[in-house]
Image: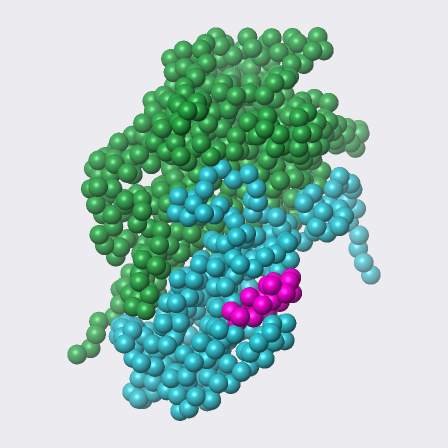
Chain colours: A cyan, B green
Amino acid sequence: MTIQIKTVEFTPKRHTFGHIARRLGGDRSASRYQEGTLDLQATENFHYKPLWEPEFWHYDQAKTAVKMADWYKPLDPRQYYYATYNIARANMQQAVERNFTFADERGLLANLPAELKAKIIDTLLPLRHAHWGSNMNMAEICQRGYGTAVTAPCIFSAMDHLGMAQIISRIGLLLDGLTGESLRAAKQTWMTVTAWQGIRKLMEDSLVERDWFHLYVAQTLGMNAVLLRIAYTGLEASYGTAGMALAMLTEFCADWLAEEGRWSDAVIKAVAAESPENNALVSKWAKDWIARAADAAVPLSVAVLGDDTAARVAGEATTAHARALGLAL
Amino acid sequence: MTAKKLSLKQRYEFLTRDLDWEPSYQPIDAIFPYDQFEGIKIKDWSGWEDPFRLTMDSYWKFQAEKERKLYAVIDAFAQNNGQTGISDGRYVNVLKIFLTGISPEEYQAHRGFAFTGRHFRGAGTRVACQMQSIDELRHVQTQIHTISHYNKFFDGMSEFPAQHDRVFYLSVPKSFFDDARSAGPFEFMIAIGFAFEYLLTNLLFVPFMSGAAYNGDMSTVTFGFSAQSDESRHMTLGIEVIKFLLEQHPDNLPIVQKWVDKWFWRGFRLLGIVAAMMDYMLPKKVMSWKEAWDIYFVEAGGALFKDLARYGLKMPKYADVATEACEHISHQNWGLFYQLCHVAGFHAWMPDAAHLDWLSEKYPNTFDKYYRPRFEMWAKQEKDGKRFYFNGLPQLCSCCQLPMLYTEPGDPTKTCFRSSTFKDTRYHFCSDGCKDIFDNEPEKYVQSWLPVNQIFQGNCGGATVPEVLKWYHINVGVDNGDYVGSPDEALWKSWAEQRLSEAS
């Protein structure tokens, strides 16, 4: 049985905006992702060259060496616009809150033996700084990039990294009973302990990269696909009795890595497929940053797992993955 | 020794600025190359007071809740054909101006705050700017989604990105934001964070949203309510920025004062479009522009500058000129729209008798004396079948890019002309405020993409009006011209007739 409510019909004159219809190849209903993304950034008739970088316009395709006939080709398979992005993250965060409450009430971290606590402080907590550097990189790509299709998800990603830096910091606060001692110690480690210096150098080197798509490749295939993957997979095996608790508390990060990868893969694939010149550039960048990230991860891999296998495996897996995206590595 | 538990403030610092570190593998100036050249001196970035202590978990939670509610209203509005419930078809022209002139600037703000959110070396400041960046993306996207439904029925909205890049009057807001975007990061914060979001927001955001509320536009007003808490966060950031700069070093004061003067005047000129909207385009009026100016600038702005006086900051230069001009600008601008709407992407119209009386009441010093006679003359011409359109290209101000139509301070019968010569070329200005801005940075403003000059140079599709309008993506006979006789009017009347026939 169905019931039918009678309504007055109003015939629309058009189904979407003109620029969207031209992209869809006709006047058809468009999604909110499409209406909120396509052709949103200004493209011509700018007024003043930036005082801080007069060689470019503030929106300028020449800020990267790769060239696209249309920067609205690398779309987001998740079709995120602000509302869907926030709702997705709020849902993920609900699980985070439950997990933190659970871990807190049962003292899952607070009651760990000192030795294990120290290992978490030395090998997991410094990641909060890596996320912070990644936050800066994604904000940079958002401000410097070209075309809303790529740049809008970058501010989402920047906020994600901030959120994950906060999740890792909260693990520290659970460990130290809200004194911040563990975070102070982890920062010392990040700044001075040899095992982290390769990673910190990698991060600082990325912060001075001015070619925004180069930076995109460095961040997504180097930092995310190699380093963060090592950090967030296999936690159960690495941290003994704390492993399950840490896996639970960083569930957001592991889920995020997979989701972010879906988007960044699509972007890199589309840009590399545009031309042999793009492919050569992206491949070169990918090769360089995957290798650097894998090298930087070796001391950490040794510290957490006892040998460099994880770093090598992650480097090799990412290389194979990059090949699958069409890159020549 | 056991350490003490963190206070909420300290906890927030651990979750934000403490994530930052002093780099050693790359020079810090290479990581932050842009925050020194403006001459602003920051002795200690840690003196930054976080204006709102939002961690990402709460941000996502609050914003997701607001979005769920907002989109439920937008969906219900579409399902119930809320567009038929607005006060009058004329009202939609407000949305056309909003979508073509304001929403693209929300986008510019989004990218601009991403710039400052990456490039200030103070970590706490960066976090606050990044949150505003993503908020501004929210605003442009929710505005498009709100107005999308109107676009399905009314004309003049479907080509907003191309129009923002090309149409002559839209270079006013575009050049305003291009100016801020091309300035250094500190000036951007004073321009957009302080002048626009704090000092003038009540004169921009609020008139549009109140106008929507008064005129039955339930989806836009719901957007307005939903954005309110974002806007108040942005205001808090704007005021924190100016206080921070002034507290950091006395040498910052003259620089900041110059920016405040500049962005106040630029903002005032931009708001002239809102003034015309408030006084002429809302079928149901909220208040007059003059009343809004008195409340939100003269009173509230006055109190603000009294508060900032302890830092040595003075009222913006030409604030008195602006206040006097508020008796005139809406009438002058609507006169402009009335005469030029055949080359615009929205409709203008002759105010009716009751409307003219309302204007007389709201502007007792100026309306009957200077402006009513013009409207009565045009009304008579309309009645005689000779609706007046100005068939020339107006000279534009080389700063604000509005036509040179404003009058001398103190003498509304005389058009104000100013000029400056730079490298053997003469540049024209509508006011002392605009001339000052140019004279302070002539290298910047000589670059202006002035739409009228561009037409004459052959860069806008051709030499004839139809060619230029085609290049503007203005659908002639549909998007442009008087509301009376437009397809929008015909549509609105058909809905009204339908309602009547259903009632009988």
Location of residue B353 by image quarter: top right
In the rendered view, tell whether residue A250 sits above or below residue A266. below
Chain part drawn in magenta: A264-286
Which of the two residues, B298 or B38, is positioned nearer the viewer here?
Answer: B38
Which is the main secondary structure of the residues drawn in magenta? helix
Residue B334 % position (x, y)? 55, 21
Left or right: where B460 falls relative to A202:
right
Left or right: where A54 falls relative to B284:
left
Please identify the quadrant where the C terminus of chain B is shown: top right
Tell me the residue at 70%/22% (across/down).
B484
Which of the two residues, B105 or B80, is positioned nearer the viewer here?
Answer: B105
Q: Is residue A76 covered in magenta?
A: no
Please identify the quadrant where the N terminus of chain B is shown: bottom left
Q: Residue furthest right?
A: A1
Which of the two residues, B367 or A57, is positioned nearer the viewer here?
Answer: A57
Residue B280 % position (x, y)? 56, 23
